Amino acid sequence: MRGLWRPLLAMCLNLLLPCSQSWIPGYSNGFHYQDINNGNGNGEIHFNGVRLLVESPQTSVMATRGSSVTLPCHYHYEPEPSTPRRTRVKWSWLPTHGAAEPASPEDVAQETEVMVTMGNRHRSYGGFRGRVRLRRAAPGDMSLVINELRLNDTGRYRCEVIDGLEDESVTVELELRGVVFPYSSHTGRYRFNFLEAQQACRAQDAALATFEQLFTAWEEGLDWCNAGWLADGTVQYPITAPREGCGGVDLAPGVRSYGQRHRLRHRYDAFCFSASIRGAVYFLKDPTRLNFTEAVRACASDGSQVATVGQLFTAWRLMGLDSCDAGWLADGSVRYPITKARPNCGPPEPGVRSFGFPPRFLKFGVYCYR
């Protein structure tokens, strides 16, 4: 007997598998492997039992900010076991916004846990606490429901099902409907380092755009010659009409890249991404023009506040806001949104027109947000 167990023990150590009663000849634990005697004589273990499959009918999901979204995930066995199995399900998240991007090779993005569940017990984590649940509409349905979607909830979500030795997963990309817009400082062009660009976008109810968001905006016609920070710490700009000073006429249209730049020393503009808003942006109908201080008071008197740049761009792009009247915004800039180009309303294509940052004593209208 001693001679029999010694090679068996060595085999256990080599395979890094637990030495338990499952190694006793003729015993089966009902999971995925059988005893060594069913191998081919080369020390292999046959995983020829029940197979765990984890699937999702969608690789990506598009949603709107503030809404609820369901990320589909289902699991089943082939063949179906005769008795229910105890499984553990973990949802994790790899963000696409700037906080998840590596600043250096040592600063590598990591998945963070969203929710872990086993049976009827579950626990959610971080900013997802209280906002997530499993749908459980049918056996094996482990779809994740996220409520009150936030601007930085975008990213890659992984549904992982763990059953003993078996561990299978599927990923679903979450994107938000929104708009990318270039943003510069009121003091001039190329004044933001990376952290200041992040703060500038947040102040406009937005976040630094990802490359994917900027690329989509370029495909939809965004053309901007000033380079700006993106969420991954790169500096890029989109060109649809090649010209001198914007990469040259010999380069094809595309998104030009300066690559990774130093996040503190180098200074550029920003490309911000803003998603849908819960309220409404409107041009305040006032018989008189207003300086900036008067505009702030006028919106407050109307039960609202001066709109941010991000809110105006979102209302223009997603809600069709169209007004040929120039108005103050919260950052001290003056702009107006055009969805139907027409004479005396700027260039012959839709867009948000900008007067820049005029002196605050000058008089314009105002865009309010309620």
Image (cartoon, rainbow, N blue to C red):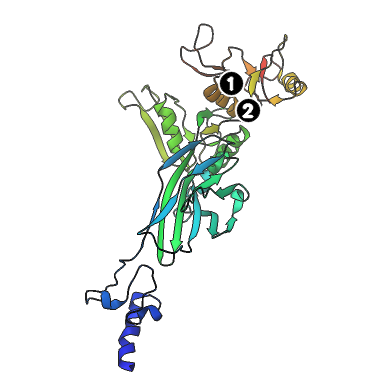
Residue 74 image offset from top left, x and y in percent: 44, 50
User: Is disc 1 surrounded by few (<14), some (14 to 19) or many (20+) residues within 10 Å?
Assistant: some
- What x and y, as percent, mark residue 152? 55, 41
Q: Earlier in the sequence, mark 1 or mark 2?
A: 2
Kind of residue sitting beneath label 1: Gly
Q: In the displayed structure, would residue 165 be above or below residue 352?
A: below
Q: Secondary structure at mark 1?
A: loop
Q: Does residue 9 appear in the picture of this structure?
A: yes
Residue 95, relative to residue 200: is it above or below? below
Q: Which residue position is annotated with label 2?
A: 308
Q: Residue at x 60, y 52 (%)?
A: 126
Which residue is pictured at 61% across the width and 32% down the height? 204
Q: Percent x, y for residue 267?
A: 52, 37
For this view, does 215 lie left or right of residue 11? right
Residue at mark 1: 356
Q: What amino acid type is highlighted by mark number 2? A: Thr
Answer with the quarter of the image where residue 16 lies: bottom left
* Residue 367 x %, y %: 65, 20
Residue found at x 61% / y 46%: 131
In the picture as drawn, the residue positioned furthest to the front comes out as 82
Residue depicted at 56% across the width and 31% down the height:
276
Whether residue 96 is visible, yes or no, is no
- Establish if 271 lies above or below 349: below
Which residue lies most toward the bottom here?
2
